[in-house]
Amino acid sequence: MRNVYIAGIAMTVFGRHLERSLHDLAREALDGALADAGCTRADLGVAYYAGMTNGPLQGQIAIPGQVVFGRIGLEGIPMFNVENACASGSSAVHLAVQSLRAGAADVALAIGAEKMNIPDKAKAMSIFEAGWDVARAEENYATLIAMGDGIVPPSGSESDRPYSRFMAIYAAMCRWHMKTYGTTQRQIAAVCAKNHGHSVHNPYSQFRKTFTIDEVLAAPPITYPLTLPMCAPLSDGAAAAILCTDEGLARIGADRSRCIRVAASVMRSFTHRGIDEPEKAIGALAAREAYEIAGIGPDDVDVAEMHDASAMGEIIQAENLGLIPRGEGGPAAERGDFTLGGRIPINPSGGLESKGHPLGATGIGQLFELVTQLRGDAGARQVEGARVAIQENGGGMQGVEEAAVAVHLLVR
């Protein structure tokens, strides 16, 4: 099996870029990744574009990638559009890895870009209502909300403002974990406070403000046990990665000391498991497959980036990835195990909660952080001696779990 490396990677600042166009953001990310890899557009053999909002928010359906690529100086090569909900960017990277290992090219591009902040916020929020079987939306919602049965939200802990129903689903997952393992709202808030603290040192982060645990708990409620800082915002932004085989690295003359090997790239889709079968979660299955492919285990991991569209996601996925025993994620977060300087730093970027969540760019943004960590270039948020990193990125809902999950293991 051919080795595959991330030779170049870049991202824009995630945030509200009201004055910038989608292709402007994409161009910045592409130019940054090409410069990082030391190659040009002419060196690319295949390109994958990840984006969800081009059609519903900008009206560009059918060929969004080709349109963006045409605006930023790419033409002629095979181009593919990738839409896999919030896992779109990671899916693009996975497909790039597969094309390189298949010998279809020796240099590949994966890029994700989104413009989510538009004047009609309700329209932007409606994107999330498409992340499940829309013909069975009410049935889906009832099934997922039932996960939280048995815990009654305290008075004043529900917002009267409109939010995506996915936040209510995340809250139901929280409540299930709370009643099953004894996880507390304070432990979930500890994840949030930690991630916002990490983001202060990340110049690419949408938010760079610290919160104490008590401030997180006192913040405006979304739906119990989630408060506003615990949830990812609407974000604009782009991220791009240049991936190469050994032959591709030699052809472009890449600096191999800065190239990070993709030790495993795994995608999994939902199953019809029960909520009481967390050991069968696709995140856990994908992680186990990735560890087996790479020949390493969770104890070898030095740093992780994972999908925390709400703070609870970090606890659930830390357990799925085997970084902490099941049911112990909450206490570990409160002890500081996941904090920089702790036993296994998670989301040193600040995570989706504070770095931002521009859907198609999110997964590649996570990989940008991990490549930066493995190169030793993360500055004040650097995990000392990091050599092995894991990324988890999920999207959509089917059954009681994500519709798609990607796990990547990177090795220095």
Image (spheres, rainbow, N blue to C red):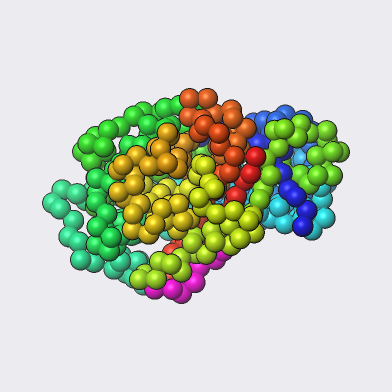
* Number of dots carrying numbers: 0
Measured as percent of width and height from the top left, residue 279 is found at 43, 67
Using residue 211 as the reference point, say whether residue 406 is left or right of it: right
Residue depicted at x 50% and y 33%: 383
As rendered, which of 24 and 187 lies closer to the eye?
Answer: 187
Measured as percent of width and height from the top left, residue 223 is found at 26, 52
Residue depicted at x 73% and y 48%: 4
Residue 210 is covered by the magenta coloring: no
Name above or below for residue 360 compared with residue 371: below
Q: Quadrant of the C terminus?
A: top right
Measured as percent of width and height from the top left, residue 92 is found at 65, 52
Name above or below for residue 316 compared with residue 236: below
Q: Is residue 301 visible?
A: yes
Residue depicted at x 48% and y 48%: 306
Residue depicted at x 70% and y 33%: 258
As rendered, which of 207 and 293 lies closer to the eye?
Answer: 293
Q: Quadrant of the N terminus?
A: bottom right
Question: Which quadrant of the view contains residue 75?
Answer: top right
Using residue 255 as the reference point, say whether residue 135 is left or right of it: left
Q: Can you name the residue that lies furthest to the left here?
A: 155
Using residue 181 as the reference point, say whether residue 383 is left or right of it: right
As rendered, which of 76 and 3 lies closer to the eye?
Answer: 3
Q: Is residue 207 visible?
A: no
Using residue 322 as the reference point, say whether residue 97 is left or right of it: right
Measured as percent of width and height from the top left, residue 30 is found at 68, 35
Question: Which quadrant of the view contains residue 140?
Answer: bottom left
Residue numbers of the magenta segment: 266-274
Residue 267 is covered by the magenta coloring: yes
